[in-house]
């Protein structure tokens, strides 16, 4: 199956933008990643099983493209995390602290944590998207959680 | 609140920028043009590598002898229809795994010790086609192919540079790869990335 780009854009642009930012930590680059990801979808001749298949594909492509941005020698001058956070309106100070703590995690833990807690993917699904083994995903998730618990203390529950 | 609810609340502060518009069709046309330019650049790069950075002769196909050869393409030994033209150029085509026909063209010249120029021979061109290839896939992954090897290098770039050692059992090659900006190899050592940047960015002198 194929869905129209417009429909997918309206539905997933925020998710892809957040996950791209999560990887490359740059609002401008994240914006380009989202645009490029939808172009990729538009140009790809791939047929999908269902909408969840499309969603997982878009997320995987966005993550890879954002990683590529990180690997590129030429990068845009990016705003510091502190400056960027000042442009956001958090509902509570705890939310702000959680956001900052996540963004300061090493990338390999950050992506897994985000796919689990924000996109609500299972360990198996995350392994499929990131092309990692399930045990590797479990280790990254566990270490990421430990780091969050260490920093956030009682603001983060033990949910393993 | 559960951790998931807290996490979602924290990241719900982020939204994609309002100025981000979806002009996919327009962008796709630009993207295709960029792809064509990249392909053309890749052909020129092959010629430059063969000729060692000197000027390139790129003659039109005047009709050559077609034959079937076996080449390693993306890790698979593939039957390729190969036509060598006396001008030192070649045309080749093969069937991809998807059943589509892929066509490639290239060529180059060599310089003798006395400075005279001659077209590359068929053997020299075929030898060059046995070199490793670097590919960037649509899903953003990057790969090196060499004989039956297929190595994913997506996460191996640091500051836009990746170093990969490949071997066919007889010869070992040390590859220096600039992300989407060319690569070189040596049987002795990794070439410094800076020297590659200088080589690829310098225009040819007439």
Image (cartoon, coloured by chain):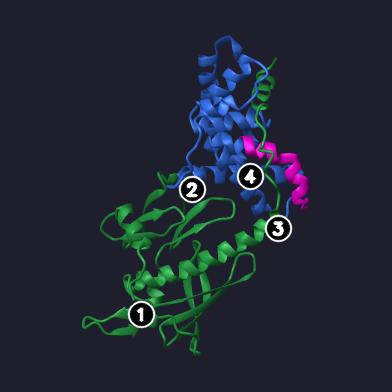
> How far apart, in angstroms, are the residues tagged by discs 1 and 4?
43 Å
Judging by the rendered image, the residue that carries numbered circle 1 is: B109
Rendered location of residue A2, percent (x, y):
77, 53
Which chain does the numbered disc 2 sit on?
B
Query: Which residue is at 50% across, 90% downward?
Result: B63
Task: Answer whether labels 2 and 4 touch (C-beta < 8 Å).
Answer: no
- Say which residue appears at 64% left-offset and 48% top-offset: A35
Q: Percent from the top left, x then y, of residue B7?
A: 64, 23
Q: Is residue A9 magenta?
A: yes
Residue placed most toward the observer, A159 or A64: A64
The residue at which mark 3 appears reads as B25
B29 over B101 or under it: above or below: above
Of residues B156 and A127, the one drawn nearer to the viewer in this rendering = B156
- Label 3 vs label 2: CA separation? 28 Å
Disc on res. A34: 4
Q: Is residue B89 visible?
A: yes
Q: Main secondary structure of the magenta part?
A: helix
Q: Counting residues from the N terminus, which is met first, the one under dot 3 or under dot 1?
A: 3
For the residues marked 3 and 4, what is the alpha-carbon distance in whole angstroms? 15 Å
Q: Is residue B116 left or right of residue B85?
A: left
The residue shown at (55%, 11%) is A153
**The hue in which chain B appears in the rendered picture of the protein:** green
Circle number at residue B154: 2
Sort mark 1 into few (<14), some (14-19) or many (20+) by Cα contacts within 10 Å. many
Same subunit, labels 2 and 4: the answer reads no
Q: Position of residue A106 (x, y in %)?
A: 48, 29
């Amino acid at each position: 199956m194929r869905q129209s780009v417009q429909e997918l854009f309206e539905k997933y642009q925020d998710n892809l933008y957040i996950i791209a930012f999560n990887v490359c930590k740059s609002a401008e680059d994240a914006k380009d990643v989202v645009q490029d990801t939808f172009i990729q979808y538009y140009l790809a001749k791939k047929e999908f099983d269902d909408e969840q298949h499309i969603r997982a594909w878009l997320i995987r492509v966005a993550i890879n493209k954002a990683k590529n941005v990180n690997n590129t020698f030429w990068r845009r001058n990016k705003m510091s995390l502190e400056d960027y956070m000042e442009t956001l309106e958090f509902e509570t100070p705890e939310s702000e602290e959680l956001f900052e703590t996540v963004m300061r995690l090493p990338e390999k833990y950050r992506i897994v944590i985000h796919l689990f807690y924000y996109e609500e993917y299972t360990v198996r699904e995350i392994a499929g998207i990131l092309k990692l083994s399930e045990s590797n995903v479990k280790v990254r998730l566990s270490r990421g959680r430990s780091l969050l618990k260490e920093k956030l203390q009682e603001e983060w529950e033990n949910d393993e | 609140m559960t951790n998931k609810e807290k996490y979602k609340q924290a990241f719900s502060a982020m939204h994609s920028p309002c100025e981000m518009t979806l002009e996919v069709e327009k962008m796709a046309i630009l993207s295709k043009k960029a792809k064509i330019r990249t392909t053309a650049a890749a052909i020129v790069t092959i010629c430059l590598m063969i000729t060692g950075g000197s000027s390139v002769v790129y003659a039109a196909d005047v009709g050559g002898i077609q034959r079937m050869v076996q080449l390693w393409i993306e890790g698979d030994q593939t039957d390729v229809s190969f036509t060598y033209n006396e001008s030192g150029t070649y045309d080749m085509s093969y069937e991809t795994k998807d059943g589509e026909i892929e066509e490639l063209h290239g060529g180059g010249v060599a310089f003798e010790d006395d400075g005279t120029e001659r077209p590359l021979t068929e053997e020299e061109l075929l030898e060059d086609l046995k070199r490793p290839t670097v590919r960037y896939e649509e899903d953003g992954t990057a790969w090196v192919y060499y004989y039956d090897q297929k190595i994913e290098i997506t996460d191996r770039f640091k500051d836009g540079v990746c170093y990969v050692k490949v071997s066919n059992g007889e010869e070992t090659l040390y590859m220096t790869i600039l992300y989407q900006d060319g690569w070189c190899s040596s049987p002795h050592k990794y070439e410094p990335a800076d020297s590659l940047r200088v080589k690829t960015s310098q225009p040819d002198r007439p």
